[in-house]
Structures are given as structure tokens and as C-alpha cells.
Image (cartoon, rainbow, N blue to C red):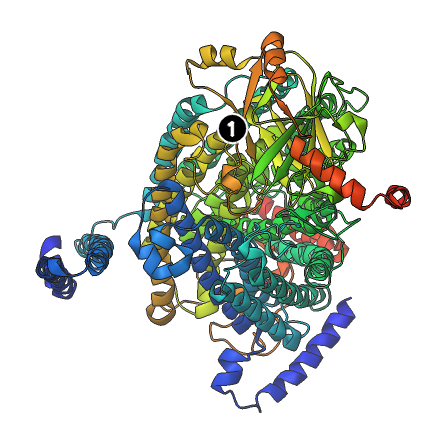
């Protein structure tokens, strides 16, 4: 009976068939045209191929829409026949309620799957001392929020299923209940207070280390689109910077009037001795960048005109992490994490944590910033501006 | 207050008489209309158009993320120099991300949402004939339209639209040579935004003054529906916060064009030492987020108000804890002004300030939690009717929970160190303010469509639209949390440059296809929307059996909303399924004298005469019972 009616709704079917025919016809024509124009330029061929593909997908979309429209029609007709036969029509309301329940069950399973499968694709354990505190904080927060997540979603979709509309029932008139409202204001407040207190102390312990200088000071400077590193030489001190002194050779603007700068070293890889307190001095030359080393739970923006720093202690060497993650090619990485231009996505730097002796071997091989070429240039510059150089120096200082 | 309101009615009524002498032309009915209902529709249709543009942009960059190495010749045909060789260029990718964010946050979820529903619902639900200033209201729409056109026109300048992210942090946005999008595209962005804020302010001032001064007789603040409360507080937020962004934007224009150094200092760009000194990029971030954080509540509060109303109507139950709902909205409004620093934990702001902002941020979670529990309690023992609007309101609650909980991670400064600017953030805000707010907006569209267009939308297409969108939104954003936990930064053009990100490529493909599916579901909506405007079933006056005043207005649209006198309000808007009453709803304009059997002592808290009457009535009832 229902299907008979469907067949009588010829219009939709006809239209559908016509589109299908037209579509396949056009596709064939395209294919034929392609076949005949093989002698044509490859460019036109590629473009005609492209349009075939586009047409194919457009048709596919149209077919999909038609299928849905037809399905809708079938349902409508089925509904009508049911009413005609004096039976109850489809109860969409209960159907939606059942869908809510199905969604709840499938959704919870999906969330569980995602948490276990994709959750295991996340960062390995923290490679820095402060990162352990952050991870503990994270686990506490995750546990609490997951409980709330499950309870509230179950209640939400559960209520929808259990209290779906019925003619026999009237809703329960309940405008308010002060006791329960107080309860669910105070409980979240208490939980959040716990999180705030823990979070506040973790944050203070991670960030508040102004008076500690660190065993090793390293300068990292961001510019479009790379990071420059500067290690202190044997004196253990970094020289002053002045952005006005930046030239092609002196790309960081190191002030070579400062004795400490003579032995400053340049490096390609951020090599760090394990279990030493490291202070990264973070600079930017042009726009804001961000030093992001997720394995160390470390991030700090590099802001032009506002030098920042981050102090941390790496605790796991690259080799240890390689064996722990079963990945012989594992490397710690430093990303740029503040939009800084077109190549923002590729400002990488390898970070390697090594033992103290390996570090000493490596640092001994690094070249100083003060190259012979730069020395020559500086000498020339000094000779040029020798009279009155003293006064200009003072002026600069006053600024 | 009440005398003022009465006086107002007389006045407006008088003016209305004048209106009839004007000839209704096409131009003053559909284009330069000053009728709030028409302006609401103009906002809605412009908002939906912008939403589709924003969605298309997101699909373009999702394709790039899923297939970073694949060439799509079609893209080159469509986009020309922005996609050389059929691959998006990195700079254009940034533009797409930027304009997608800007359009969605400002043009769809601020103007499209508040503009539509504040215009439609405030006068109709408080019982006013129009806005306080219909002319300024019209200007508000036209400024919005101009802003939209300027924003989209940036795609036609040579170097492409702005591309510094929707937060346009200087120096990147301040130095025209820093990236192609920081040239003319950025200028257009800033001009567009100034127009947008002008529009938003004109609208906001109008909404606030209408709510405060033009309520009908009996409509005191505690009888207003939650939609009006939410839209009112949203307008207050916007009026207080948006001017700060204008200040920030104007200073940025100065830095870009007139050589000042408000945000710039110590800059060496492409090896060239720049003359800027003494400015601070952090200052811009403070100004931006002083608007930017209230902005996310400007987006979500109307959605909350709409969902509250829709859920109460469709579960045939009063909203649970009406007062608590209002107080938590007020709490959110106040607190939202002192939490902006949580966007800046790792920017170099003083760590002590970070700690303070963390405390205020986690406090704001309390009113949000109260609202969530109240929604759940509203559903409990209801008689739930699943209209498409109801489903979208439920979806809004579900997203608000899922996305709100991850806010507890991000508001914690210590955890934010490693989560800042990763995909975890993307997942968080797309759920809590993106999806939740758009679902609130769609709930509103489905619910008030009969009021706006006098016809009904198709229910089953609405069901299809809801389920596909709801499921695919979760499929898109849920996996992103884990990408964030793996330290994958947002706004990355390709995941192929880092070995550590390659295992997320398959997930990216999955997300992209889920996003395409969501895009297709919107076709069901747009078809339903347009088809129903012209050919939908005719609506009756009160299709949902709702209590609020807009359903007492005639189906036909007249300038002035009600024929004759504006109805007087006697009760709160949530008397659903009141025991003792035959029907399961009692509209706000029904006096208590007509519903003696269902009155409760609670109804007469501030009305001693009524209480006396009520007591008299109950005692006679009792006497009658005893006689029987």
C-alpha cells in the first residue's frame, strides 16, 4: 500500500532519473571528449579532468540529497497510510527520545575509545622537574572533570529518555528548591577552591624563581622564521645585547664593547646538560614568537622589547627517552607557538638533553659569535667613528 | 516606573497612528525598515550568510590540514594566486584561519545572534511597540552590513585578507611588511571592526534603554523571561567592553600608519633596524582581551537565555531556580570583566598577575556550573517534547558541559603553560562558545521562526539537521583535545614538517571528513529555512503553547506589534504544568483571578491584597469541601 503511493509520486522519481541520466551522459561525454583530445595540451587535459572530478562529486552530492528526500517521502507516505488505516502514526517524539539514549551509550563508548586510543598518542612523561608537578595537577583535574562529565551527560540524556512526553502525564511543577541549589553552588565552589589552591602553588613554584640565576644561561632569540641560540663561553656569562647594533654579520645585535660577549658561542641545536638548572633568556627581534617545548611542559612567549625567561631542570636525557618511548629516532623539539607569519609552522629546533661530559665535549666544539670577519668590520667601524665616539657612547647610555 | 511606562504607551500609540499615513513601500518595508521585527530578520539573514562564508573558509583549511601534500586543481581555479599549484599558500592558510575566526566570533555569534534575537524578542517579550530608538536600530544594522562587506572584500585585495590570527597581535599586525596579510588586508580588517563596534554599540544602547524604560504594565524585572535577562546583560557587557577594543584598534592604526610606537619597541625586521621605541606589545593584548573575554560571554549568554526559555517551554516545566539563573547571569557579567588575563599567562605578564587571574577565572566556573545543574533539574520529571528547537537547546547544554569542563584546565595557569595555543584550546572554545552558541542560535531560529516568518519549519528536516550536526561537531572537536595534549600547536599550516606530528595526520583526515559532513547537514537547514519562508505550513498564534508575551501578538506583523492596548503582565513567564490548572501553561497576561484553582501563596509574595483574596478563596473552598 505504502509503496503504491510512492510509485504514484512520480514527479520526484522522474526528476531523479532524469538527473541521473543527464549526469552519466555528461560524464560519458566528458570521457569521450577527453579521449579525443589526448593530442591537446596537457594543461587543458588536466583542467577537463578536474571538471570531471568536480562534476562527479557534485552529482554524488545531488544523489545523496535525492536519496534523503526520497527517504523522507517514503516516511511521510508510510505515516499517512498508518493514519488512514486508523493506526497510530510514527511517534517522532519517542523516536527522538530513543535516539538520545542511543547517543548517550554510543557517545560514552566513543569518549572512552578516544580517551584510551588517542589518549595514548599524547606526550610521554615530563622530561623536566617542574613538569612532574604540572602532570600531577593535570591528572587531578582530569579525574575530577571526567567524573562530572560522565554524570552530567548521563543525567542530561537519561532525563531526556525517561521524561519524554506522554499524554497521560503532566510535568512536575517544581520552580525552585533552595536547599539543593545551595548544595550545587557550594560543592563546585569547594572543588574549584581545591583546584585553585593547588594550581596557584604549582604555578608559583614553576614561575617564581627570580632570585635563582640558574647553572646555565642560554639566550634564545626568535625571528622570522628561525631561532638563534647563544651559549656563554668559558666565563659563564653572556654579553649585553642592543638591537640597534644588529647588522648582517652581528645578527643578534651583541654589544661587543661588553667583555663578556667576546667568548659567546653560537649553536644549531639546543643541547642541555641533564639535571642542571637551565635559564632560557627569551628574546624576539621582529614579531612575537613563543618558545614551546611540550616535553618539558615549558612555554614562554618571545616578545620584542620585553625579554622574558623560563627556568627549568631537564631530568631525562634524549637517550633515556628514546628507550622509554621505544622510538630510536625520538628527539625533543622546540616549536614556535605564537602565530608569526607564513612559515610559522616550520620554526623548529631540535633539543637534546645529554650527560654533563657529553655536554662539555659538545660545547668545546662550538664557534664564537665574534668571527674574524666581524672583528674586522668592528675595527673599521671603530676607526671611522673614533673621534667623539666616547660622547656618542654616553648618549646611548643615557637613552 | 509604572507611571512612566503608562505614559510611554500613550505616546507610542499616538505615533503609531501617524505611521499608518505613511505609504508602505518596498524600500521602507524591506530595506530601510525601522521595524524591529524586520531588522531582526535582516540581522538573521546577514548572519546566516556570514556563517556560511565562515564555514566554507573552515572547510578550505580543513582540506589543507587533511591533505597537506595533495594538489587540488580546483582550488587553483577558484582561488588563483592564493592556491598556487592547487595547494593553499601558507599565507593564505593564515588568512583563512583569521577571517574564519573573525567572522564567526563577531559577525555570526555577536551580531547574528544578539542582533537577531535582541531585536526580535526584547520588544515582543517585554511588551513594547518597538525599540527605544528605531532609527538608531536601523543604523545599527546598516553599520553591521557595511562592516561585513568590508571584511569579506578583503579577499579581493592583492595581498589577501588579514592573516595575523583573529586576535591580531602586534607587531605582526602592525608592521605591513611582516606578512602579506598585514598590508591592505589588515587595514580593511581594522576599518571593518570600527564599523562593527559602532553597530554593536548602537544596538546595545538601544537594547538596554528599551529593557529599562519600555516594559509593559506589570512587567517588573523579576517577571522578565530569561531570554530578555540574558540579552539585556549581554548588551550591558557589550556597551562596556567594546569601546576598549576601539581604543586598542585606533592605537594600532596609529602605529601602522602614522609612525607612533604604542605597541612597538626594539624591532629588527628582515635585518632592518626599525625606529620604534618604548611601546609594548603586551599593552595591545590587555586592551584586546579586556574586550575579548567579555566577548565570549557576549556570545554565550544569549544562547544560554534562549536555551533556558526553549527548554522550559518544551519540557512543560518552569525553569528550575529562576532567581539563581538570573543571579548567575549577573555574576558572569560582573566576573567576566576581571578574568581577561587568563589569555596571557605565558605572554610575559607578571606571574603574580597570572595567579590572580587564575583565581578569578576559576570563580566564574561556579555560576556556569549552577546554570548547568539548573538546566538538568528543569528536565527532571518534565514532559519533554522534542521539537528541533528543544534538541538544539539540549545540544547547547551538552556542548557547554563538555567544553566548559576543559576550561577548568585552561584557566589553571600551571596547566596552561603546556596547553596554551595548542589544539586543546581550539577544542575547548569551539565546543563551549562555538558549537554551544551556534546551537543556541539555531534553537532560537527553530523556536521563533513562526514569529518571524508566520510559517513553520519542517520538523523532520530539523531532526536530520540536528543529529548530523551534533554528532559531527563532537567528531570534529573531541579528538582535538588529544592533539593538544600531544603538544600540537594551533594555526600550523602542515603537520608534515615535524616527525612528532605525523601520527596525527590520519586523525586530521577523519576530522576533515566529519567537518564536511557537518557542512552538508547545514544544507538541510538552509533548504528548510528558505523553503519554509515561502511554502511552510502556516503558523498559529501560539504554536508551542508558550507563556511569554510575544505569542499574544497577532500572527500578522503590524508595526507596533499589538492591535489596541498592549497586554498587561500579571505573572512570571514560567507557569507550566501548574497543578490545579487544566492546561499545562498559563500565559503571562492571564490574571490570577482567572486561575483561582491553581494559585499558590507563593504567587502573592509582593501583593498583600492578592494574598488576602487568595486566603479568602481557599477558606471558602475548604468550607465547600466540608459541606460535601
What residue appears at the point 50 percent right and 84 percent down from the top-left corner?
Answer: B27
Q: Is residue B209 above or below residue A2?
A: below
Q: Nearer the viewer, residue A48 or B204?
A: A48
From this viewpoint, is residue B326 visible? Answer: no
Most foreground residue, A335 or B507? A335
Given residues B270 and A149, the one toward you in this image is B270
Horizontal and vertical percent position of residue B422: 54, 35
Q: Residues within 10 Å of mark 1 (few under 14, many from 20)?
A: many
Whether residue A147 is situated above or below residue B187 in the rendered picture: above
Counting from the top left corner in percent of width and height, residue A1 is at 10, 54
Side (left or right) of A64 relative to A37: right
Q: Which residue, given by chain and number where applicable, does mark 1 sit on?
A: B485
The total of numbered circles placed on residues is 1
Image x and y of residue A186, in percent: 69, 30
Foreground residue among B162 and B267: B267
For the N terminus of chain B, the image quarter is bottom right
Q: For numbered disc 1, what is the local secondary structure?
A: helix
Report whether residue A301 is seen. Answer: yes
- Chain of the residue under label 1: B
Position of residue B203 in the picture relative to residue A204 (left or right): left
Where residue B577 appears, as percent x and y from the top left, is 51, 48
Q: Residue furthest top?
A: A357
Amino acid at each position: 500500500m505504502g509503496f503504491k503511493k510512492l510509485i504514484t509520486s512520480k514527479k520526484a522519481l522522474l526528476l531523479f532519473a532524469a538527473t541521473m541520466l543527464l549526469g552519466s551522459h555528461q560524464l560519458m561525454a566528458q570521457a569521450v571528449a577527453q579521449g579525443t583530445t589526448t593530442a591537446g595540451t596537457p594543461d587543458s587535459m588536466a583542467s577537463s579532468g578536474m571538471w570531471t572530478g568536480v562534476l562527479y562529486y557534485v552529482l554524488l552530492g545531488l544523489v545523496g540529497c535525492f536519496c534523503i528526500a526520497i527517504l523522507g517521502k517514503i516516511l511521510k507516505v508510510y505515516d499517512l497510510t498508518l493514519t488512514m488505516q486508523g493506526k497510530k502514526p510514527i511517534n517522532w517524539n519517542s523516536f527522538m527520545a530513543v535516539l538520545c539514549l542511543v547517543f548517550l551509550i554510543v557517545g560514552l563508548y566513543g569518549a572512552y575509545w578516544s580517551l584510551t586510543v588517542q589518549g595514548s598518542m599524547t606526550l610521554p612523561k615530563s622530561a623536566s622537574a617542574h613538569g612532574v608537578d604540572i602532570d600531577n595537577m593535570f591528572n587531578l583535574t582530569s579525574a575530577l572533570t571526567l567524573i562530572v562529565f560522565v554524570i552530567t551527560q548521563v543525567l542530561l540524556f537519561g532525563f531526556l529518555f525517561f521524561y519524554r512526553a506522554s499524554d497521560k502525564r503532566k510535568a512536575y511543577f517544581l520552580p525552585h528548591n533552595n536547599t539543593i541549589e545551595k548544595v550545587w553552588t557550594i560543592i563546585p565552589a569547594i572543588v574549584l577552591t581545591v583546584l585553585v589552591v593547588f594550581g596557584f602553588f604549582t604555578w608559583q613554584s614553576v614561575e617564581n624563581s627570580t632570585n635563582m640565576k640558574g647553572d646555565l644561561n642560554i639566550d634564545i632569540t626568535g625571528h622570522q622564521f628561525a631561532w638563534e641560540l647563544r651559549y656563554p663561553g668559558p666565563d659563564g656569562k653572556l654579553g649585553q645585547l642592543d638591537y640597534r647594533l644588529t647588522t648582517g654579520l652581528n645578527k643578534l645585535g651583541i654589544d661587543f664593547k661588553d667583555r663578556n660577549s667576546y667568548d659567546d658561542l653560537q649553536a644549531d641545536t639546543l643541547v642541555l646538560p641533564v639535571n642542571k638548572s637551565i635559564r632560557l633568556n627569551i628574546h624576539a627581534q621582529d614579531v612575537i614568537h613563543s618558545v614551546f617545548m611540550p616535553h618539558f611542559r615549558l612555554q614562554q612567549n618571545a616578545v620584542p622589547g620585553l625579554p622574558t625567561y623560563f627556568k627549568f631542570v631537564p631530568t631525562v636525557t634524549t637517550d633515556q627517552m628514546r628507550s622509554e618511548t621505544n622510538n630510536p629516532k625520538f628527539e625533543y623539539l622546540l616549536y614556535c607557538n605564537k602565530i608569526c607569519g607564513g612559515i610559522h609552522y616550520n620554526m623548529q629546533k631540535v633539543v637534546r638533553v645529554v650527560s654533563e661530559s657529553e655536554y662539555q665535549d659538545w660545547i668545546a666544539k662550538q664557534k664564537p659569535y665574534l668571527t674574524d670577519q666581524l672583528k674586522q668590520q668592528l675595527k673599521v667601524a671603530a676607526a671611522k667613528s673614533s673621534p667623539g665616539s666616547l660622547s656618542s657612547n654616553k648618549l646611548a647610555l643615557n637613552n | 516606573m509604572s507611571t512612566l511606562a503608562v505614559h510611554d504607551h500613550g505616546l507610542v500609540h499616538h505615533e503609531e497612528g501617524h505611521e499608518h499615513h505613511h505609504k508602505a513601500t518596498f524600500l521602507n518595508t524591506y530595506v530601510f525598515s525601522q521595524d524591529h521585527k524586520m531588522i531582526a530578520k535582516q540581522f538573521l539573514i546577514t548572519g546566516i550568510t556570514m556563517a556560511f562564508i565562515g564555514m566554507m573558509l573552515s572547510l578550505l583549511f580543513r582540506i589543507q590540514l587533511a591533505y597537506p601534500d595533495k594538489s587540488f586543481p580546483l582550488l587553483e581555479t577558484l582561488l588563483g594566486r592564493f592556491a598556487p599549484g592547487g595547494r593553499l599558500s601558507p599565507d593564505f592558510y593564515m588568512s583563512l584561519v583569521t577571517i574564519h575566526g573573525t567572522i564567526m566570533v563577531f559577525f555570526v555569534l555577536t551580531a547574528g545572534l544578539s542582533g537577531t534575537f535582541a531585536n526580535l524578542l526584547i520588544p515582543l517579550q517585554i511588551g513594547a511597540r518597538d525599540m527605544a530608538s528605531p532609527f538608531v536600530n536601523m543604523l545599527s544594522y546598516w553599520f553591521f552590513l557595511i562592516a561585513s562587506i568590508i571584511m569579506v572584500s578583503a579577499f579581493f585585495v592583492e595581498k589577501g585578507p588579514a592573516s595575523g590570527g583573529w586576535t591580531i597581535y602586534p607587531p605582526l599586525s602592525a608592521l605591513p611588511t611582516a606578512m602579506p596579510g598585514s598590508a591592505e588586508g589588515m587595514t580593511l580588517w581594522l576599518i571593518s571592526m570600527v564599523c562593527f563596534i559602532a553597530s554593536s554599540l548602537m544596538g546595545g544602547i538601544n537594547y538596554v534603554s528599551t529593557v529599562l524604560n519600555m516594559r509593559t504594565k506589570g512587567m517588573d524585572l523579576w517577571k522578565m523571561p530569561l531570554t530578555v535577562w540574558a540579552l539585556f546583560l549581554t548588551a550591558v557587557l557589550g556597551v562596556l567592553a567594546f569601546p576598549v577594543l576601539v581604543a586598542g584598534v585606533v592605537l594600532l592604526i596609529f602605529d601602522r600608519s602614522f609612525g607612533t610606537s604604542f605597541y612597538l619597541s626594539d624591532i629588527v625586521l628582515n635585518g632592518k633596524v626599525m625606529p620604534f621605541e618604548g611601546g609594548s606589545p603586551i599593552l595591545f593584548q590587555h586592551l584586546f582581551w579586556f574586550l575579548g573575554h567579555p566577548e565570549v560571554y557576549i556570545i554565550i549568554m544569549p544562547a544560554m537565555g534562549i536555551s533556558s526559555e526553549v527548554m522550559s517551554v518544551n519540557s512543560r516545566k518552569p525553569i528550575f531556580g529562576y532567581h539563581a539563573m538570573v543571579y548567575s547571569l549577573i555574576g558572569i557579567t560582573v566576573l567576566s570583566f576581571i578574568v581577561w588575563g587568563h589569555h596571557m599567562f605565558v605572554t610575559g605578564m607578571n606571574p603574580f598577575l597570572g595567579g590572580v587571574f587564575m583565581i578569578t577565572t576559576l570563580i566564574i566556573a561556579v555560576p556556569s556550573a549552577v546554570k548547568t545543574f539548573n538546566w538538568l533539574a528543569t528536565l527532571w520529571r518534565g514532559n519533554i517534547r522534542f521539537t528541533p528547537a528543544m534538541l538544539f537547546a539540549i545540544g547547547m547544554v551538552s556542548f557547554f558541559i563538555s567544553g566548559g569542563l576543559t576550561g577548568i584546565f585552561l584557566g589553571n595557569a600551571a596547566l596552561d603553560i603546556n596547553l596554551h595555543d595548542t589544539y586543546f584550546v581550539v577544542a575547548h572554545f569551539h565546543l563551549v562558545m562555538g558549537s554551544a552558541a551556534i546551537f543556541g542560535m539555531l534553537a532560537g531560529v527553530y523556536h521563533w521562526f513562526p514569529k518571524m516568518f508566520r510559517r513553520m519549519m519542517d520538523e523532520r528536516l530539523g531532526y536530520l539537521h540536528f543529529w548530523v550536526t551534533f554528532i559531527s561537531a563532537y567528531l570534529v572537536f573531541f579528538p582535538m583535545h588529544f592533539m593538544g595534549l600531544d603538544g600540537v600547536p594551533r594555526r600550523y599550516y602542515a603537520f608534515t614538517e615535524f616527525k612528532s606530528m605525523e601520527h596525527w595526520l590520519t586523525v586530521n583526515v577523519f576530522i576533515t571528513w566529519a567537518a564536511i559532513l557537518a557542512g552538508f547537514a547545514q544544507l538541510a537547514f538552509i533548504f528548510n529555512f528558505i523553503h519554509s519562508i515561502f511554502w511552510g505550513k502556516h503558523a498559529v498564534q501560539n504554536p508551542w503553547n508558550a507563556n511569554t508575551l510575544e505569542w499574544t501578538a497577532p500572527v500578522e506583523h503590524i508595526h507596533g506589534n499589538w492591535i489596541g492596548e498592549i497586554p498587561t503582565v500579571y505573572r512570571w513567564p514560567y507557569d507550566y504544568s501548574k497543578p490545579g490548572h487544566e492546561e499545562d501553561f498559563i500565559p503571562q497576561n492571564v490574571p490570577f483571578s482567572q486561575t483561582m484553582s491553581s494559585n499558590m501563596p507563593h504567587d502573592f509574595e509582593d501583593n498583600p491584597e492578592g494574598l488576602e483574596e487568595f486566603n479568602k478563596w481557599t477558606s471558602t473552598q475548604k468550607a465547600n469541601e466540608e459541606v460535601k
